[in-house]
Image (spheres, rainbow, N blue to C red):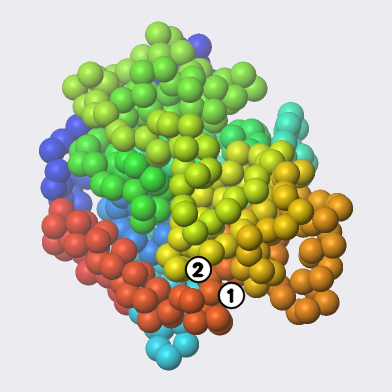
Amino acid sequence: MTENPKVSIVKKDIPVTAGEILDMTRRALDLLGGLSGKIKKGGHAVVKPNLFAPYPPPVSVDRRVIAAVVTLAREAGAGRVTVIEGVSMGTLMKRVNPAISGTCMRRGYGTLEVMNILGVKKAVEDAGGEVLGVEDAEKVSVEIRGGMALHRALFPRVVLEADYFINIPAMKTHTMTMVTLSLKNLQGLLDEKSRYFSHRDDLDQHMVDINKIRLPDLVVLDGLIGMEGMGAGESGSPVDMGVIMAGHDPVAVDCIASRCMGIENPLVVGTTRIAQHDGLGCANPFQIQVVGDQVESVRKKFTLPVNYTQPLESIVTGVYRNIDLYIGGACPSCWLMTALVENLLAKVPEKFSLIVGVDPKVPPRLSTDLEHTFFLGECALATGGDLRDMRNEMQLKGIDRFLGGCPPYEQALVKLEDLLIASGRLLEAEMIEKAKEHRKKFFDYYRARDASWTPEM
Ligand code: SF4
């Protein structure tokens, strides 16, 4: 790490062709001194893009940016280039897969399936690389030196042993970390269990700790189409940016990228702030040398997720007339999950009680029967007194309204959807239609900017 890290920015109005993206990426690297001599002749370069879900940019990184990086790594002498990714937990567990949903709804996509749909596999192979899903990768148990929230992890051997490691994040907002840039992007390398349980209120520290396993040698950020709003998935909205950025210091890249997104003080981003504190890089914009285009000439004010623009409780308490919420002693993660659970229950025209947290204050008698009473999170499931008696009665009567987990993440939402479907309160057909709408939204947007792209369905 240099004392004054450089971050390059190359801007071009979109739409851009694959050739123009290769030129932009080459220029972004040339502004840093180029790749020549940085990769061992015949060595193994490993590339980690952000392929969040089976949707094209801005949800996932542009396949043409990945192909450009593979091409440049090969030109610089890499004998082998492996592109490795593990798609998001929501994609693995929860997303409805409309392509093959027939009479029975199917959930989830594997990483290679996503790589195929997006055309990443073909683009990488055409450029002389190979693809690998984290699910299929050989993992090594590593101790994380200096890990604060994450002390040990199963990590792909191929990344640990890479001669050169390149991180390709997208430029997106994120409901749990405000933005997702290079530091957050390495989360996809963890095994599924670790990825799942990292989504607590110490998520930022987790993300930083993952970077302590293997810092990237280079970051190439795909900011051609950014995402604002309720990212990082289909609830976010695209922003045309036309930017490729690069740097060797991931903290510096994130600092400058967040400024390009209109975040004046980069230290409000938890991952950036903690990574600088933990010595992973520089987040002081006055010490970072921006080369090429400047922040002022590319900056757009991204709309942040609503939970970063107004108090979290304003989207949780007193919002839905059909829900009595009892929440107390709950972490921000449970508050956020409460918002998602309420959003789903609000679609059903019946009255519900929702109980969340370590010690929610609940009256002696709820206004709902046991069928309409849900517990969210491990803390709610461990409360004593009247609530324990209530849960015991539910167990005896075979009424399962327990949305467990710490945090109660995607599996809680899957379970709630399944319960509502089983009781006829939600319709599979409507969920499949909704998934098709999400797909169409991003497919149409991206196709209008890259007519050469056809999804491999
Ligand atoms: S279950 Fe409890 S500890 Fe876990 S995220 Fe929720 S409130 Fe926090």
- Residue that appears at 32% across and 75% down: 433
The quadrant holding residue 201 is: top right
Tell me, for residue 350, which label it has, or none: 2
Of all residues, the one furthest to the top in this rendering is: 286
Tell me residue 73's x, y (percent): 39, 45
Horizontal side of residue 36 vs 323, given as left or right? left
Foreground: disc 2 or disc 1: 2
Cβ–Cβ under 8 Å for marks 2 and 1: no
Which residue appears at 59% of the width and 35% of the height? 204
In the image, 151 versus 327, the foreground residue is 327
Would residue 59 be visible to someone looking at this image?
A: yes
Residue type marked 2: Glu
| Quadrant location of the C terminus in the rendered image | bottom left
Q: Amino acid at mark 1?
A: Leu
Judge the density around disc 1: few (<14), some (14-19), many (≥20) Cα neighbours within 10 Å: some
Image point (55%, 81%), residue name:
423
Q: Which residue is mark 1?
A: 419
Of 182 and 335, nearer the camera is 335
- For the point 13% across and 38% down, which residue is it? 13
- x and y percentages locating residue 304 in the rendered image: 37, 35
Q: Secondary structure at mark 2?
A: loop
Left or right of 292, for residue 279: right
Measured as percent of width and height from the top left, residue 55 is found at 34, 61
Question: Is 215 left, or right, of 298 in this rendering?
Answer: right
- Disc 1 within 8 angstroms of ligand 1 (CB): no
Q: Nearer the viewer, residue 81 or 328?
A: 328
Horizontal arrangement in the rendering, residue 372 relative to residue 116 (left or right): right
